[in-house]
Image: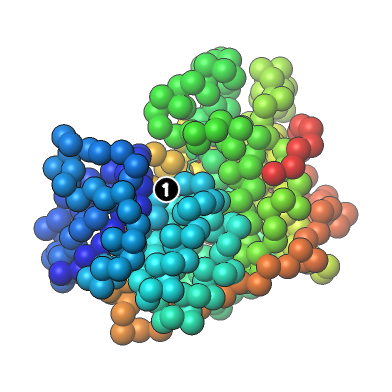
Amino acid sequence: MINIALLGFGTVGSGVAEVFSENRDLIRSRTGFDFNIKYILDLREFPDHPLGSRVVHDFNIILNDPEISIVAEMMGGLHPAYDFSMAALKAGKNVVTSNKAVVAAFGPELLREAADRGVRYLFEASVGGGIPIIRSLTELAAGNDIFEIAGILNGTTNYILTMMFKNGLSFADALASAQALGYAEADPSADVDGFDTCRKICILTAVAYGTLIPFEKVETIGIRDITAEDIRAAEAQGCSVKLIARAVRTPDGIYLKTEPMAVRKTNPLYAIEDVFNGILIRGNVSGDLMFFGKGAGKLPTAGAVVSDILDIPARADSQPHRQLWVRDESAYVPELPKELLDRSLEELGIPLGKKARC
Ligand code: HSE
């Protein structure tokens, strides 16, 4: 029996409980283990939930219980999520998370601590919802020179842009609909101003290159100023407006940016609609690889958390690829060199919009 603790019982946390309950027999038969959610840490009580009796309000109960070997952090926000994660690693527990804010801010420290303690810090659910992009990119980057990552990494904004493009919805109505469907962040600015996307491309860059560029430095433009006219103008040119995050390896470092673009019909990102995310990985060995799937929502994201939990006993006796990141602001390149810019205008599309910073 493997005992786990869930930190946070909101959309993702309750989804993880649902996956373990619904797929109990499948999980046992595939992994050979039984998983038991021993504790749920939350400020609230859940008297009507079958796991309501597992709710605790003191993190020390989890920290001091030697039976807990895996902690799944799905609290959101930086603190106390980071502090609890670090304390759990120091206590020799594995930690998995869906919290991109923590990974983008403190990934180097958490990964270092996990390596030093001989445990794992896994974050599949932090980028791309149900798409297994972190695991795939980790393995791809081991023997493949990745020269570009381009993606639609935020389900809420892609949903909003799709509703504006296809159904003529206003920006406000489309955002309200995304919130009702549970896609949006608690603070909608994180989605619509591109901050969520910016953190996600910083995480993917760190996975590919081992270098975490501080997200505060990265130029980020959201979709708040995109109008129905912008969308129709793009359509008239055979393009569709998407919030695109890019990391391009240049001779001087890594170009990073998040911005709305009129994406050409010939690019695979053109066809990504609704809450779906699409991620194009370009490598010298792999060529172009396209990942596609639901980028937000309860079960896809919970499924990514569960996949990390199941990976821990599965690889207990093996040597997973190492993830150790260095935080390096000097690696940031704010402008694409001319030759790469020309190629990008032709292959990907035309940038739109005004500047903001995350
Ligand atoms: N608000 C995020 C999105 C949730 O819409 O993509 C998943 O990270």
Residue at 38% from the left image edge and 74% from the top image edge: 91
Q: Is residue 324 above or below residue 277?
A: below
Q: Is residue 158 above or below residue 32?
A: above
Q: Position of residue 219 (x, y in %)?
A: 76, 46
Q: Which of the two residues, 318 or 3, is positioned nearer the viewer here?
A: 3
Q: Is residue 107 above or below residue 90?
A: above
Horizontal side of residue 58 vs 269, given as left or right: left
Q: Quadrant of residue 256?
A: bottom right
Residue at 58% from the left image edge and 62% from the top image edge: 106
Q: Position of residue 86 (x, y in %)?
A: 47, 66
| Visual colour scheme | rainbow
Ligand 1: does it lie within 8 Å of the C-beta at label 1?
no
* On-image quarter of the C terminus: top right
Q: Which of the two residues, 25 or 230, is positioned nearer the viewer here?
A: 25
Q: Position of residue 276 (x, y in %)?
A: 47, 40
Horizontal side of residue 175 vs 148, given as left or right: left
Q: Position of residue 42 (x, y in %)?
A: 33, 45
Label 1 amino acid? Answer: Met
Q: Determine which residue is flagged by label 1.
A: 75
